[in-house]
Structure formats: structure tokens, C-alpha cells
Image (cartoon, rainbow, N blue to C red):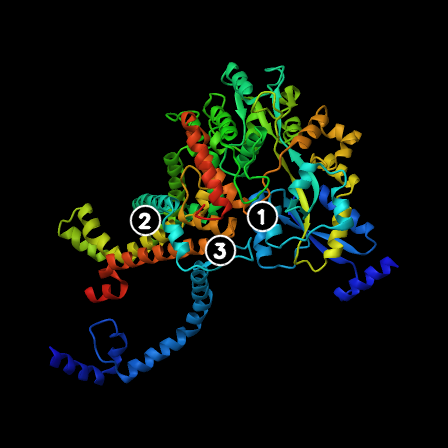
Amino acid sequence: MEAASAGSEAVRGATEDEVGDAGGGKKKPITERARAERKLGWMLVAPAVVAMLLVTAYPILYAFVLSLQDVDLRFPDEGGFVGLSNYVDVLSSPLWWTDVFNTVFITVISVSIEFVLGMGIALMMHRAIFGRGAVRTAVLIPYGIVTVVAAFSWQFAFQPDTGFVNQLPLIADDKDWFGDRFSSFAVIIMAEVWKTTPFIALLLLAGLTTIDGGLYEAAKVDGASPIQRFFRITLPLMKPAILVALLFRTLDAFRVFDTIFIMTRGSQDTESLSILGYNQLISRLNLGLGSAVSVLIFIAVMIIAVLFVKGFGASVPGKEEDAR
Amino acid sequence: MLLAALTLSACGDDDSGGPVELSWFIFNEPSGVLPTIAKRCSDESNGEYTISFEYLPSDADQQREQLVRRLGAEDDSIDIMGMDVIWTGEFANAGWVEEWTGQDQTAATENVFASMIESASFEEKLYAAPIWTNTELLWYRKDRTPKPPTTWAEMIQMAAELPPEEGLIQVQGNRYEGLVVWLNAMVESTGTSIVSPEDAEQVALDPKETEEALAQMVELAQSPAADPSLSTSDEDSGRLSFQDGASSFMINYPFVYPSAEAEAPDVFKQMRAARYPEVIEGEPSAPPLGGINLGVSTFSQNQDQAFDAIRCLIQPENQLEIAGAAGLPPVREDLFEDKEIDKVYPGFADLMRESIDAAAPRPVTPAYQDLSLAVQRAIHPLDDIELDAIATTVEELRTDVETALAREGLL
């Protein structure tokens, strides 16, 4: 095995052209050319990396430093280094755990619904024969509406006295949607789903269009039913697109803020983690506690991202090519 | 001579040598009277200053957020601030607002309601000049209840006796500052307070009195007279519902009166005002107190001019003009003798004066925001509180307020 790979290395050294895209495969010693190209690559991305460090790494580090201190803008004379006590305060508070539940609840339910609906809409848009452009544009409209405006519209619609929803059949006229935890969640989730399904649908549509139509022809010839074609061809080949769509939406949903802020301001136990952080930072000006909340949200988001990438590991784009 | 000196000092600060430009941060009061009086003061200052406006959002929480964000960053572009009555403690303790002393102090407090001076003071120092105040009244329909109720219990009972489609009571029950306004007025009406008057870092909330006050709120929330959307209601939703005719009682600020005149003339004809109801029969109520105080930012480069400008803005005739145009009550008690005020509050000018005089400001404490969030969390939604276990709820409320005043824990 060792000898074979060493031998192939020698061959590759001679045919330098192939080396450029060999990075992703098995471990191979790097050639001069590859090293130079890698260096060039780093130099090319350097400005972007520096800019990213300035605008993301610095604030994140600063937030971390603040989270270890007792800083309150209203009490400028007090404060100092307090170690991890802000984190202890946050993690020992029942409020934090209620909000973790709320956030995860909203995220899981809304992303699941959005995924199913989005897939349906993507398939429909893919098949649309006439008016493709018009259909795609129309579907995007909810996503183009400012979240705050959308949240207000939904809130007005569900208002017991002035909204129209309670006048629909089968709905009690005096149902106070925002007066109860789970009916509030229902409206919040509906508003989220309405607004961001188009986003998922578009990402999935992009995935759909990359699938070679010939595969379906072949499957049809072999007698595969539409359901089999969907689960055996469409879904597996769309894995990278699904990963991207779900990952983006999950991260987005996990930081849900606007809709809840407008509809309930977090009352009826509908507060999300972002609102919790906002309350500590912006309302209370307690930068220490608020930064601790923010850092914890950041860690949670990282965990979600890692889980997604690991969970769908086999379908990370570059490897898909090898599989074919 | 004085003018020359001022112009000279202005020259030192400013290259152009013209009047200093003062930025007044305040919400965009819809009647548009503020720019009028600001322009007049600028003109009368003989080239000392011109006042320009930076408008804040209409929501008080958002006004505060925008201001504190700038103040936290020591932004020197703010000269004059329109401060809600509850911000004084916070702004003063953080060192964001200048103290009023000497002649300025006298000018800012002359003939002003004691309750408003209290709201502008922190640790016995004055930090802002009240310009207008506000209070809530009980609004009722004289065609349905010829004689207004004097206590909360009576009001709930009267509402229950009306047909269901007329018998609602409008109060502010959403989880926001308005709920704290309500609780504070109820608690103060029983004779106790949220924060100890002696020590702004200690909770008061005497259990017996607080239980009585909170029980009234819960009884209302659980009675059929409560609006189905009580737990999300605010001043404006209450106003709309009253104008619709479904409500016979409403606790609200006087802006609802001209609004009803314009939007619901039939309701307006039957609409009358009475004093904020009592919690304990025979013990005068302590109505809520609102309003705006003007402060000078610590980071302002033109503090002398800012003090002068505020002294001009709060002059009696300007207060009257604000009342006439915007319906906002003056802070000087002597102005209530003016005929102009009778026109603004037809038939209830004396009631307004009496209410403002008896009003109890919300606690002045640097941790007010924490306190407010803690109170909102502890008692919202009101209809979930069990009347049998009210003592436990009050005990929890006290602990929550205590923690909030110590600025501990998440809120």
C-alpha cells in the first residue's frame, strides 16, 4: 500500500497538471507547485480574512472579555473581573432554560414545516411550464417583505378585535391568540414559515436544477415509480442543497428575534434566546451578563453548524464529485 | 455687555462665530408644537443658540434605547434630552445628565407640582426640568353609568351588571411599562410603594397592602369585564375598543378625549372623566404620573446654552401652548388657573390638576429598567395569578424586585 502510493506520487510529480485538485483525496506529500499554489491562494484570500477578523473575530473576542466582567453602563464606578460568574448566573437561571426550550421548539417546528413546504414549492416551480419567471418572483414576495412589517401584518390579522382571523368559520370570535403560550407560538411559527419558506424553496430549486434529467429517463425505463424516483434520485442528489438550505434556516431560526419582539415582546413565555440577550444588553445595559448570553448563543450556533456538517458529512460538495 | 461676552465665548467654541446649534433629542410629538416654541426661543436668544431637532421613536422604550446607546458611547452630539420621568435615576447615576443648581434650579421648579419635581430628582438633586406632565383618568359612559364608580371593586361590579357587549373595562395589561404604571398606582393607592422611600436599593411592597392592590388587578383580569385581549392591551388598543362602544370604562391618558371627538362622535358625547379609582374605599387614589423632563447631556459641548434654552422652553406661555396644541398638561400648578386650560380639558381641568397633584411617580432608581422588567415578568399575565395564593405571588414579586434592585440574575 505504502509503496504503491509512493509510486503514484512519483507519477503525479511528473504530470503536474493533475496535482492542483488532488488536495481533497488521500494523504499525499505536497509538491512544489501545489505548495506555491496554496501560498498564492492564501495571499489572495488574505485581505478577505483580515477584514473578517476585524469585523467578526474582534467583536466576538471583545464580547468574550466583557462576559468575564461585571460591566453595567448605568453604574460606571462599579465592576471588575468576575471570572465565570456571569455564565453561572445565566446557566443557573430557569429563564435561560425556558428560552432555550422556546428557541429550539420554534426552530424545529418551523424549519420542519418550511422544509416540507419548500420542497413541494421547489418541485412545483421546477415543473412549471409557463410563466416560470413570474411564479418564481411571486413565491419570493414574502421573503422580500421586511420581517418587522410581516410580523405586524400577522399580529394585526390575529388581533381579537380588529383582526380578520377570528371572523373565519370554526374559530372562536374572542380567541385571544397572544394570550396563551402555545397559540402565540402557533402564530409566530406561521409567520416565520410564511416568510422563509420561499428562501428554502429557492435553495432547493437550485439543487433540483443541477440533477441530470437523463437519470430520470433511465429510472423510468427501468420502471421506477415517481415516489421511488423522488427518494432514490432526487433526494440523494440534492443532499448538498438540502444541507445548505437546512443549515442556513436552522441558524436563522435559532436567532429568531423580530417576529417575537413585535408580537409578544416575549410575554406568555414565548421569549427566544436573542430577546433574552437583547434585554440584558440593550434594555438593562448590563454588558457583562448580556455578553455571556451572546457568547452562549454563539456556542449553540457553532454546535448546530458542526452537527449539520457532521450529520451530512458524506455530502460535503467536493466529495460528491469523487462519488460519481 | 452680557451679550457681547456670550457672543465672544461662542466665537471661542465655534469657528463660524454664529449662534451655537443645540440638538434636542425628543420623540416627534405629533401636534408639531415643539418646533414652533423651539424656533421662538432660538429667535429670542439674540444669536446665542438655535435649536435643531433629532427625533426619537414614539415608543418610550425605544427612545430610551437610542439615547442610552449614544450616551454610553459618550456621544457629544446630544445637547438637550427629552427624558421620560422614569429615566432620571439611571441617567443621573451613570453621569449622563447635568445637575440643575442655583438660578437654573429655581427656574425649573417654580410652582411645579411636587410629584414632577420628585420624578426629576435623584438623591435629592435635580437633574432635569419638567416641561409637561400627564396622568390617567377613569373614562366612563354617562349613558350607561350616570354616576362613576369610586373604587375598583365598584367599577368591576358595575361593569358586570351591564350587558356583556357593553361591559368591558379597558386597562393596560400587556407585558410592558404600562403594566408597571398600573401596579405602581395601585400599590401607592394602598399606602405602600415598590421601592422603599428611605433607601432606593431596598424593596418596600408591604405584604398586606400589596396583596390588596394586586388582588384588585387579578379580580379585574378574571372577571367577565376584562377585555379578552387584556394580556396584550395598551393605551391605544384600549382607546380603540372604547371608541367601538364595547367598553364602558377605561383607564387612560387625556389624549383619548380629542381622539374620540374626531373618530367616534357618538361615543364622545357620552364620554366623561372621573378620578382614578380607589383601591381601598375612602382612601384617595394615587393616579399614575407621566410626562417629560428636559435634561442637559454631560457630553454636550454647549451646556450653558442648553440650560438657557431649556429655561426658555419651559416658560409658562410655552407650557400653555403645548397644552393647547398637544393636550399635554403643564407642570406648573398656577397655570391651571388659566382659561386656556379649561378649553383643553373641557369640564375636567380641575380633575386633571387634582390628579397630578395626588399622583405618585414611579420609583426613581438607577436600576429602574431591571425593576420594570422584573415586575412585568412577575405579574404578567394577570389572569394566571391565583387569588387564593396571592400571598405567595406577592412574596415572589418582592423577591424578584429585590433581585432586580441588586441587578442580579437574568431578566
In three-dimensional space, the C-alpha distance between marks 2 and 3, rounded to whole angstroms, equals 44 Å
Which residue lies at the image location 29% right of the left edge and 56% below the top edge?
A: A243
What secondary structure is marked by label 3? Answer: helix
Total numbered circles: 3
The amino acid on which the numbered mark 1 sits, given as a three-letter code, is: Arg
Q: A139 and B139: which one is in front?
A: B139
Which residue lies at the image location 31% right of the left edge and 57% below the top edge?
A: A303
> For the residue carrying disc 1, how many other residues have a C-alpha within 10 Å: few (<14), some (14-19), or many (20+)?
many
In the image, is A316 to the left or to the right of B141?
left
Where is mark 2, residue-wise? A122
Confirm or deny contact between disc 1 and disc 3 (CB under 8 A). Answer: no
The amino acid on which the numbered mark 2 sits, given as a three-letter code, is: Ala
Q: Are marks 1 and 2 on the same chain?
A: no
Quadrant that contains the N terminus of chain B = bottom right
Pair 2/3: label in front = 3
What is the number of the mark on residue A287?
Answer: 3
Quadrant that contains the C terminus of chain B = top left
Where is mark 1, residue-wise? B64
**Which x, y percent locates residue B38?**
75, 47
Confirm or deny contact between disc 1 and disc 2 (CB under 8 A). Answer: no
**Which x, y percent locates residue B260?**
63, 27
**Residue B398 appears in view:** yes
Does residue A265 sit above or below B253 in this rendering? below
Q: B125 and A205: which one is in front?
A: B125
Query: Subunit of mark 2?
Result: A
The amino acid on which the numbered mark 3 sits, given as a three-letter code, is: Leu
Q: Give the mark nearest the N terminus, 2 or 3.
A: 2
**Which x, y percent locates residue B62?**
56, 46
> For the residue carrying disc 3, how many other residues have a C-alpha within 10 Å: few (<14), some (14-19), or many (20+)?
many
